[in-house]
Amino acid sequence: QVQLVESGGGLVQAGGSLRLSCAASGLMFSRYSMGWFRQAPGKERDFVAGISWNGVSTASGDSVKGRFSISRDNAKNTLYLQMNSLKAEDTAVYYCAARTGIAVVMSPRAWDYWGQGTQVTVSS
């Protein structure tokens, strides 16, 4: 049974930083592309960042480029999202996702497994 468990969310002031983690189990982590998505109330789920199975290729959404960075530790089966210079508009539930393809894809429909999400709230 595949499990993706996010942690590290919370309340932070604008301009601050948070680091999200996603612990994966039940899958061969090093063979999956991994990604972060977010969803604010009343809005669609949006792509935040993605990373290829070997960590060589990454991609980020336009709204977070230069502020967020994605990384992975295949030895620990863990995905990370470092979020700096946080803004109020970054407030959302953040989800970890995994897909079997080698490419990072922005559409949520292309992803096979999802975590339960972790709330990030940025106060202005």
Image (cartoon, rainbow, N blue to C red):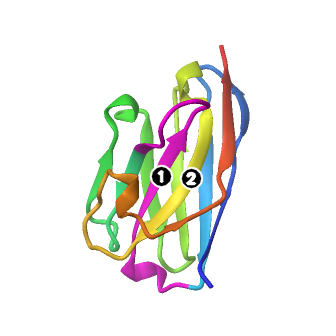
Relative to residue 83, is residue 111 depicted above or below?
below
Residue at 61% x, 29% y is 91
Quadrant location of the C terminus in the rendered image: top right
Question: Which residue in the protein does label 1 denote?
Answer: 36
Callout 2 touching callout 1 (CB < 8 Å): yes
Q: Nearer the viewer, residue 107 or 59?
A: 107
What's the mark number on residue 46?
none
State which quadrant residue 87 falls in: top right
Kindly identify which numbered label has been placed on residue 95: 2
Q: Residue furthest top?
A: 124
Position of 90 relative to 14 (above/below): below
The stretch of residues the image draws in magenta is 27-47
Look at 68% across and 30% down and name the residue there. Answer: 121
- Which image quarter is the N terminus in? bottom right
Q: Position of residue 8 (x, y in %)?
A: 69, 49
Q: Is residue 14 above or below residue 108?
A: above
At label 2, counting other C-alpha atoms closer than 10 Å, the crowd grade (few under 14, some 14-19, many 20 or more) is many
- Residue pictured at 52% horizontal, 33% vertical: 84
Indicate yes or no whether the magenta region holds residue 31. yes
